[in-house]
Image (spheres, helix red, strand yellow):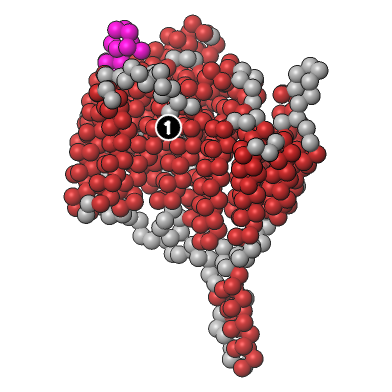
Amino acid sequence: MTLAAILAPLLALCVVARGIGFLSALGVVSAIAMLVDGTDPLHQAGAAFALLFAIGPVWFLSYYQQDNLPERSGPAVPFLALGLMVVLMLAGSRPGVMAFPSGLCIVLAGLVAVTCRQAMVWQWAGLLTCVEGVLLSGIIQKHLMVVGVTVLAGVLIAVLGGMCVHRVLPRLAVVRASGRRQGSKRKKGKKEPGSALGAADAAPHPDYVPKPPRYDGADTP
Amino acid sequence: MTFPVFLAALAFAWPLLGAAVVMSLNTPRSREVAVWMAGGGCVLAAAVFLFPATGAAATGWDDDPVQRAGRVMLAFGLLLTVLEANTIPNRFLRGLPHISTALAGLACVTPDPIVGLGILEASLAYGVFVVSRPAGQAMAGWALLRTGSVGMFLVLAGLLLPAGQAASGLLLACGIVMLAGLTPFGQPWREENDTLLFLPFAGAAILLSMRLRPHGGDAFDTALIAAGLASVWLTACAGRSHDGLRMFRTFPSALALIAVGTKADVAALLFLCGWCLAGGSRSERSWAARTLACFPPGAPFVGCLLLLSMMSDWSWVFTVLTLAGILCAVVRAVPVQGEGHAVWPQDAAGRVACVVLVVTGFLVPLAMMLGAF
């Protein structure tokens, strides 16, 4: 049991409470926990993947404008995750032996984030938290199959989540460019029709299109 | 390489070959070729069931007869899907049922169920990639990936806990219920994608659950039975409302999970047959609804008898609850609309499904009596 292994579930709770911003810190602490446990190639590879799955998505998201939709889930969600962690610890403890399944606590926090949060980016962060947790647990237990499957799942979730983010969120470069264009037009005294919607108006929801007409029989199975 | 091993390898590669052929052909001819390839897959799966590779168990590959028979059901599910489908212009969508069936079959036979889970996740990711490609479908695809991944992580978390622990069994059962898409716990599947991706995916999850039983212990069995009973009773309570019809789609998988929890694997196999051939969006048709509601003749009816006989040895309370739930669901939830009240379907796909369901209902108990299972 290391300090990093204790800190990692707390950072997972921060992901549940505050969002994807804490994912990088969680990845770094998970990687440290893995490397403290051992420095053989499995641990090193696990730490590298933990860093990749934590830092890559956050870096990717920095190119996109976050949506500021109000979250309907209440402030009790992190406490739900905390309660589940306590239940897991109580279920796993034996008389005289105090176990702290750090990785599985992270998984539970991630699952709570995925199921209780409505924002897509937050759910993506929850799934990546689950990846970090299973990876940490698999590495500490030296379960090669679990590590392999988790890496595969992590790659798929990161790629498909990234594709979804690319389609759903507006890119910052586009938003800034349209803002600059509108600013220069205002300076020239031209009035932009529809500019009341703001800068994001020039970068509409990339995945929003009017619903196509229902496929006829020749198009659907 | 012996002949049975070659046959087994060919049976796994065949749907992938079928996907490659169907995707490479031009649209008008693709449906006919897809039907032939799927038919060939059925013959190969049946041949693998009859001539198992005896050395496979020694090398770690699963050689359980129930799993082999389950792969036959998956192959017939693919045949029915392509028989029902009209010509699909999209190449990726055309190849999707072949690829998802191939990966589902491979997931059930891997030496370690964890690897099977990874293959299922890859199948889900490919399916999500295909179904979410059209504009406006990104969030729908994300919802599928999210729910499926939650199920997979629950199962992985259960497998990381010590075997036989209550927490391990509960996590495994919750994960399997999510992967099998059991309403109201499972995936938000819709009509457009459920026969192409969901039927083999959920079928593989049911088959995988049999292999997770040694790790899950009694808690796993009890949780599966509880989830299945909850789904059956909620289906009965929802009646014929819109939600009720949605819940009735997964009625056979609920019964299959109860059968897995009761250790009645052959009954689960018969419910799986009902799921692959009459489940999903087909369940709104008259013949499929009657089959799924365990009306004789048909595989689910025989499965229901087997399940109740096995369950009565285990617990009378659960037997009465299951029987009452099935009867309530039959009385309240079986959809009556659709193609009239026809028991015998008018289309070729429906006729093939009915014949296979009836023949399976006779052959599986016969094979059980002869000691094949």
Q: Quadrant of residue A92?
A: top right
Work out which residue is located at the far front of the displayed protein and give it: A40
Label 1's element?
Answer: helix
Q: Which of the two residues, B87 or A35, is positioned nearer the viewer here?
A: A35
Q: Position of residue A40 (x, y in %)?
A: 65, 37
Q: Which residue is mark 1?
A: B107
Q: Is residue B371 magenta?
A: yes
Q: Can you see residue B293?
A: no
Q: Residue A57 appears in which quarter of the rendering? A: bottom right
Q: Chain of mark 1?
A: B
Number of numbered labels in the structure image: 1
Q: Is residue B237 left or right of residue B104?
A: right
Categorize mark 1 by other alpha carbons within 10 Å: few (<14), some (14-19), many (20+).
Answer: many
Secondary structure, magenta segment, majority class: helix
The x, y position of residue B163, in whole percent, is 61, 20
A209 vs B53, left or right, is: right
Vertical relation: A161 (above or below) A46:
below
Q: Nearer the viewer, residue A139 or B171?
A: A139
Q: Quadrant of the N terminus of chain B?
A: top left
Q: What residue span does the magenta drawing correspond to? A: B361-373
| Amino acid type at image mark 1 | Ala
